[in-house]
Amino acid sequence: MIVAEQKPLAEIAESIKDAKKVLVVGCGGCVTVCLSGGQKEVDILATSLRILRKKDGKPIDTATETLERQCDKEYVDKLAEKVQAAECVVSLACGVGVQYLAERYPDKVIIPAQNTKFIGGTTEHGIWEERCALCGECILARTGGICPIIRCSKSILNGPCGGSQGGKCEVNPDTPCAWTLIYEQLKRQGREAALGEIFPVKDWSKSRDGGPRKYVREDVLL
């Protein structure tokens, strides 16, 4: 899932300092799972903004809504009436959701209330960790389901680098060495021989290169 972190209240408040009617919009997808942009966070943010503005002597009206997903035009369209009534919109979605709102409602100022962090998952309650670099060329089948691109501090394809100590990364001793994890996983599966297969130079053109990437499923096009 996409992991995001809510911006400081003061930063959000500064972004809407001239508005009197604000729509705060959450997203029921990833940011709800990582507890930063669901209905609960929408209500808390709207209340906090109202209190802050009242203390400053500049009261504000807020409306709220949480869409199933902000990265889907079908749901974004449903906001039309509320967006029309607002002076600006504060989005608690990831950067994709913010851009979808901005494209659908180009006459309105759309304010991001989150910093989108990375693609990851929950390791403990309240802790999320990056797991995917979105590199466009997945090699997890050959590495026991452990990604060296994102979990190795040096993104080494043919590791280990030789600097790890006790299974920990030399760059950050709190980080397990990805290639130690890969070795242990392949050994557990009786596949250690796979470590002898050399990965060719990575084709980074499939990653973040040359502008936004697009993925098309011809079989579901309308």
Image (cartoon, rainbow, N blue to C red):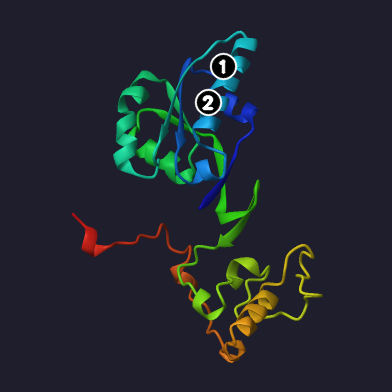
The reply to whether residue 158 is in sight is: no
Check if mark 1's residue and mark 2's residue have beta carbons within 8 Å.
Answer: no
Residue 29 point in image, percent of width and height: 45, 44
Q: Amino acid at mark 2?
A: Asp
Report, in whole angstroms, how far the alpha carbon at label 1 lies from the one at label 2: 11 Å
Kindly indicate the quadrant of the structure image that contains residue 72.
top left
Judge from the rendering whether residue 167 lies leftward or rightward of residue 85; answer left or right: right
Q: Which mark is residue 50?
A: 1
Q: Nearer the viewer, mark 1 or mark 2?
A: 2
Q: Which residue is mark 2?
A: 43
Q: Secondary structure at mark 1?
A: helix
Considering every residue shown, the one lying at the far top of the view is 57
The reply to whether residue 4 is in sight is: yes
Q: Residue at x 46, y 72 (%)?
A: 137
| Vertical order, 185 against 37 (above or below) | below
| Vertical order, 23 against 206 (above or below) | above
Question: Which sits earlier in the primary sequence, circle 1 or circle 2?
Answer: 2
Judge from the rendering whether residue 6 lies leftward or rightward of residue 167; answer left or right: left
